[in-house]
Image: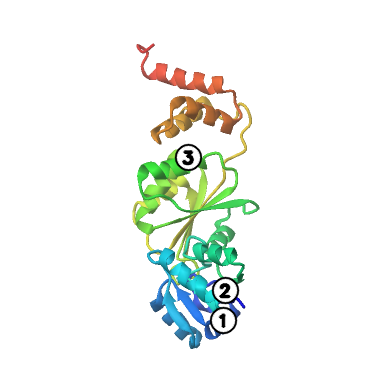
Amino acid sequence: MSGTLVLAGTPIGDVSDAPPRLAAELARADVVAAEDTRRLRRLTQALGVEVAGRVVSYFEGNEAARTPELADALAGGARVLLVTDAGMPSVSDPGYRLVAAAVERGIRVTAVPGPSAVLTALAVSGLPVDRFCFEGFLPRKAGERLSRLRECAGERRTLVYFEAPHRLAAALAAMAEVFGAGRRAAVCRELTKTYEEVRRGTLEELAAWAGEGARGEITVVVEGAPAAGPGDVDAAELVRRVAVREAAGERRKEAIAAVAREAGLPKREVFDAVVAAKNTRDPQEG
């Protein structure tokens, strides 16, 4: 008889936010797979619970290699509890591979719901939350980052990103370049912790603020693109959007077509705006 895989949400800051079932599952599990075994030890001490089962590490570096071992344990009837450093496993954290392996073998997968940085940041951001999409971490390299942001330039749902503090200023500056400097956003730092801070403003304002340095766990919430009908986007903005796409490596023809589609305009109108801007910059150029 196969076992059960339990994905357990852990506190994103305040340990008292731990779900009531977490202590019971920690004590009950045959195997506890933890992203960081030292953090697990601190968590169990805070909860006053002893782990009777085997504890193994399960993090980005060994996730692929350890998944078959844990899947075999599940197939043999073990109850495996998966915890990450904070929040829900598999959401920008290790876990997806093990869930997929368990599902493939027909093994039961369940969860202990818990705190979520994504939903917490959305709730306190002050931005629309009726529709949203989670984009995880942006690429580290500038060109790849711009390319990823460009894919979301016309996204009307609220966007949620995770970001490292040392890359925050660059990420916000790139967002201002692609989405527009005036797009509203919120930077949520150290949620539920002692030094929790929610900074709201335009992307331009937040990029300037982040340039002074930021620390801690960061979640960025960005307002979705406005619903634009024909004539709502001026020529300068059309030219800017095309330039952003070209800078990210897209051919001008494809960039013009994409911007026209986003703005709900004929391609010819965007093309004419780009040509007019080019001629304005260099009147001698035909």
Q: Position of residue 259 (x, y in %)?
A: 53, 30
Residue at the image point whose x is 37% and y is 41% from the top:
143
* Residue for badge 3: 150
Q: Position of residue 41 (x, y in %)?
A: 42, 82
The amino acid at mark 1 is Glu
Helix, strand or loop at disc 2? strand
| Alpha carbons under labels 3 and 2: distance apart | 37 Å
Residue at the image point whose x is 47% and y is 39% from the top:
150
Residue at the image point whose x is 48% and y is 88% from the top:
50
- Which circle marks residue 6 in the picture? 2
* Residue for badge 1: 25
Front in this rendered view, residue 71 or 80: 71
For label 3, the crowd category at 10 Å Cα-Cα, with few meaning under 14, some 14 to 19 and many 20 or more, is many
Rendered view: 198 above or below 252: below
Residue 155 located left or right of residue 177: right
Rendered view: 244 above or below 172: above
Residues at badges 1 and 2 in contact (C-beta under 8 Å)?
Answer: yes
Rendered view: 36 above or below 168: below
The amino acid at mark 2 is Val
| Alpha carbons under labels 1 and 2: distance apart | 8 Å
Helix, strand or loop at disc 3? helix
Residue 123 located left or right of residue 201: right
| Alpha carbons under labels 1 and 3: distance apart | 42 Å
Residue at the image point whose x is 59% and y is 43% from the top:
156
